[in-house]
Image: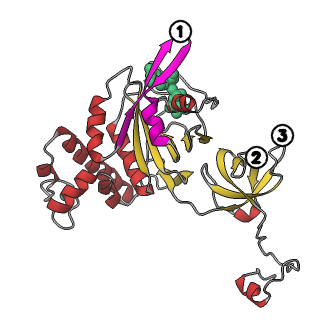
Amino acid sequence: MRREYDESDARVRPNRRGSRPRSKRRPAHEDAVPGTIVGVDRGRLTVHLEADGTEVIAVKARELGRRGLVVGDRVALVGDVTGAEGSLARIVRREERATELRRTADDADPTERVVVANAHQLGIVTALADPEPNPRMIDRCLVAAFDAGMDALLVLTKADLASADALAAAYAPLGVEVVATTMRREGDERTIEGLEAVRERLADRTTVLVGYSGVGKSTLVNALVPDAGRATGVVNDVTGRGRHTSTSAVALELPFGGRIIDTPGVRSFGLAHVDPEHFIAAFPDVAEAAAERCPRGCTHESAEAGCELDAWASTPDQRARVDSIRRLLASRAQADTY
Ligand SMILES: Nc1nc2c(ncn2[C@@H]2O[C@H](COP(=O)(O)OP(=O)(O)OP(=O)(O)O)[C@@H](O)[C@H]2O)c(=O)[nH]1
Ligand SMILES: [Mg+2]
Ligand SMILES: [Zn+2]
């Protein structure tokens, strides 16, 4: 059996480039070109080259093994990197990820997926109506952002249909940045208002948009990136849900610096992979109250069990938050029994 070339061989024969041993040594690919994955279509990946922004179609090289590649991954390419029609490059390396946004299908299903890599910020897109906002979904996304070490931005869309005030007031105390957008129609012309505040928070960083189908993620991306050309859908009159218009994640360059990643709508944001400790830590006001008032080792399950959070919560928003955390903990506890 042929032995794998390893570091000890390198020490024995230093500086002998050009006389490579005929072993299964992994090629170093020092000439590989760096880029970022901006689209994944089954085995075909679209990579944006760091040097000049050329978009190259590539496949995963054998040596990457089972290592997954997702939008946002920083990679190194060899082969035909011209981006010419019909050309194909090979991805030979995946750089270490700064962040990973992960989710499970639901809390009881531990199968975990990395949604995107290297994003700095999670843009939680919530429509104020059609579909109805769901604070529990927002809370789940906040936990996921916290767990991934990402900042959270709450984008409230469709402010033409309902007021943003209540949700903005509920989340501002958590230190979550909140922006609201409104679509105006004039004939066939559609414009989105409220984009200045959105641009300010997106500039020079990578933001991934998540939310239910039909909340307006792709509409927002089209408004921010003039030639994005993302398809947008209609919201079903009966269910109030979108129709899953976007089917895969795509990263786009923002004209004012930074990147935005549009993702397909999700039905839920499973947190089976998240340490329950992180549930409460994602809500700074509750976390502080828990640290100050709750008995050591408190599970925060109920006042009867000694939890002081009910006594602390004096406003409806605080009570809603405590309630939400308890639900998250309960659904997570169920998941643990599987
Ligand atoms: N009234 C109103 N409608 C909006 C607004 N923003 C988006 N829409 C509409 O909402 C519908 C769905 O928008 P999309 O951008 O396709 O939603 P999405 O979140 O990308 O949906 P998926 O790709 O299925 O996840 C479209 O018909 C949009 O025109 C808004 O601010 N107000
Ligand atoms: Mg979409
Ligand atoms: Zn407690």
Horizontal and vertical percent for residue 75?
67, 57
Please name the amino acid that badge 2 sits on.
Ile
Residue 57: mark: 2
Mark whose residue sits in front, 1 or 2: 1
Query: Quick one: label 3, few (<14), some, or many (20+) residues within 10 Å?
Result: few
Query: Residue tagged by mark 3?
Result: 85
**Residue plotted at (57% across, 26% down):** 232
Q: At numbered mark 1, what does the secondary structure look like: helix, strand or loop?
A: loop
User: Which residues make up the magenta segment?
Assistant: 177-202
Please name the amino acid that badge 1 sits on.
Gly
Horizontal and vertical percent for residue 143?
37, 51
Please say whether residue 211 is visible from this viewpoint. Answer: no
Horizontal and vertical percent for residue 292?
16, 61
- Looking at the rendered image, the quarter that the C terminus falls into is bottom left
Q: CA distance from mark 3 to mark 1?
A: 38 Å
Query: Quick one: label 1, few (<14), some, or many (20+) residues within 10 Å?
Result: few
Q: Residue furthest bottom?
A: 12
Q: At numbered mark 2, what does the secondary structure look like: helix, strand or loop?
A: strand
The answer to whether residue 196 is above or below residue 98 is: above
Query: Residue tagged by mark 1?
Result: 187
- Looking at the rendered image, the quarter that the N terminus falls into is bottom right
Earlier in the chain: of badge 3 and badge 1, it is 3
Horizontal and vertical percent for residue 190?
52, 18
Q: CA distance from mark 1 to mark 2?
A: 39 Å
The quadrant where residue 55 appears = top right
Q: Which residue is more in the foreground, 293 or 177?
A: 177
